[in-house]
Image (cartoon, rainbow, N blue to C red):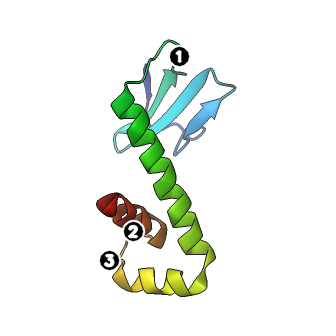
Amino acid sequence: MARVKNNVITQNLSGAINRQLVFKTYASGTVVTKFPDMSKVKLTDKQKAQNTRFKNAVSFAKEVLADPERKAAMHQRTPPGKLVYHQAIVEYLAIH
């Protein structure tokens, strides 16, 4: 892992390049890491269930955003500085 400070080229850079390098931006600077190899990771049944639950929450949030009436209702319950999308996910996960 390499730390980069005060570099114009990598400033605020984030994301992966060709599935080989990953740029992560933190308050202290940009970090360059190797792309993670997740091929040998075996998820537990609990992790799989949580992934499914979160996938359903994302689908619910997208449905809310697609419907102007539901989006407006959700916006009223959304705290300042938070997105309606994230509020919909929070509410879905609290119920399910």
Instruction: Say what amino acid the circle numbered 3 marks.
Output: Pro
Among the two numbered marks 2 and 1 on one chain, the one whose residue lies closer to the N terminus: 1
Which of the two residues, 52 or 33, is positioned nearer the viewer here?
52
Q: Residue at x 32, y 77 (%)?
A: 79
From what the image shows, is residue 17 above or below residue 87? above
Q: Which residue is mark 3?
A: 79
Image position of 4 with respect to 26: above or below: above
Label at residue 64: none
Q: Is residue 94 above or below residue 73?
A: above
Instruction: Work out how far the residue at label 2 is from the one at label 1, CA to CA, in angstroms.
Output: 32 Å
Tell me the element at label 1: loop
Decide: few, some or many residues near mark 2? Use Cα within 10 Å; few <14, some 14-19, many ≥20.
some
Q: Hey, which residue is sitting farthest top in the picture?
A: 40
Q: Contact, CB < 8 Å: mark 3 with mark 1?
A: no
Give neighbour class at mark 1: few <14, some 14-19, many 20+ (Cα, 10 Å).
few
Q: CA distance from mark 3 to mark 2?
A: 8 Å
* Of labels 2 and 1, the one closer to you: 2
Q: Residue at x 35, y 62 (%)?
A: 90
Disc nearest the viewer among 3 and 2: 2
* Residue underneath mark 2: 87
Pointers 3 and 2 in contact (CB under 8 A)? yes
User: Can you tell which quarter of the image residue 77 is in?
Assistant: bottom left
User: Could you tell me residue 70's position as x and y percent?
Assistant: 51, 82
Please state which amino acid type lies under the numbered disc 2: Gln
> Which residue is located at x 52 percent, y 46 percent?
12
**Quadrant assignment for the N terminus:** top left
- In the image, residue 85 sits, relative to residue 29, either above or below, namely below
Res. 37 mark: 1
